[in-house]
Image (spheres, rainbow, N blue to C red):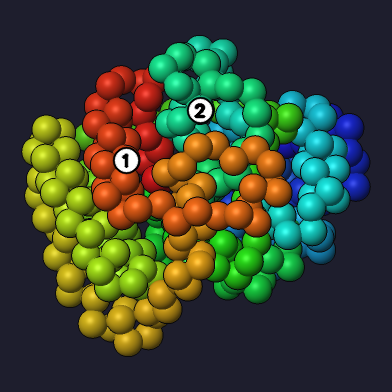
Amino acid sequence: IESLRQQTYDNIEIIIVDNGSNDGTPQMVKESFPEVHLVELDRNTGPYHGRNVGAAASKGDILFFLDDDATMERNSLSEIVARFGVEEDLGVIVCKLIETRTGRPDPNALDPRLYDGVTNPRECEFYLGDIVAEGITAIRTEVFEKVGRWPAHYFRASVGKEISYRIIDAGYNMIWFPKAIAHHKSSPIGGISREQIEREKTFYRTRNLLWIYWTHMPVTRAMFESGISVTYYLFDSIRNRVFLFYAKGLLAALSSMPRLLRTERKPISKKALAKIDYLKYGTLVTDSAALDNIVPIPFTKVMRTRFKYLNKSKAGPSLKRSNDG
């Protein structure tokens, strides 16, 4: 909140959604930040429902979703507002994220191609395929309402991918924007063990990725993406000793699939899928003019690159893929 108070762009409203905390946060906000619009929920409904509640309470033309373990540099919101003004079809801006402990850009929210074999990524804005870092992202309110908000029933994990499909299918662009900078400080775990965090992450990631592929992808592509995810995360769960939670996530996905296919299946268009592949598996696109000449990426290249990205995720912190990706 202090970092938002210090922004050079001052036409903002700050909305805090308290997701059923029991640590005195609501009282602290009321006493220390009386200008903040505080919304209190009586239980933890998950980050996506919380974000939807905050968005519904807002009056702005741009929504900026900021997690509670991040702060913003002073010019970030001014830069975001200015960048939206340049491009009418721009729906989403994702900030550059700096990890507080290291002082380096956090790779968890970035595209692996930014690294190009080096520790620090290149400093250029580029168009995103299906990567949205949910807790440091600006979305036009009009776009957010048009595509249908965050899917609250996912509860947590991988929803940045899900909403990006809908945004691109609706005809909007998304960019990674290094002029807007957020700093991330890992949250204290409190009474939750790291093992419990890994278990929950494994369950929700396994279930949610299958939900995403089968509600938004053409059948052939859904089979391919599901096969890769199921196989890779099987071995990942064995390596991390959380196989039981992987199995529970897989069972939860399969048991709910008939209902989801009836009520939520809406495959994105071939044009949107080609655009996502072009932006994700081709060279970095830094100029909007290149979006008018999208060259379909061969399926064999998509397959090779998917395995390449997954292998990079084992290389260590500097190349680790996002948990939401």
Q: Residues within 10 Å of mark 1 (few under 14, many from 20)?
A: some
Q: Amino acid at mark 2?
A: Leu
Q: Quadrant of the N terminus?
A: top right
Q: Is residue 75 left or right of residue 204?
A: right
Asked whether 26 or 77 is in front, the reply is: 77
Does 256 sit above or below residue 77? below
Q: Which mark is residue 114?
A: 2
Q: Is residue 14 visible?
A: yes
* Structural distance between the alpha carbons of marks 1 and 2: 14 Å
Q: What secondary structure is marked by label 2?
A: helix
Residue 109 x, y percent position in the rendering: 49, 35
Q: Is residue 324 left or right of residue 89?
A: left
Please name the residue shown 80% across and 27% down the image: 74
Q: Is residue 53 visible?
A: no
Q: Quadrant of the C terminus?
A: top left
Q: Which mark is residue 305?
A: 1
Please name the residue shown 77% across and 33% down the image: 76
Please name the residue shown 69% across and 48% down the image: 288
Residue 180 x, y percent position in the rendering: 72, 33
Pointers 1 and 2 in contact (C-beta within 8 Å): no
Please name the residue shown 77% across and 55% down the image: 62
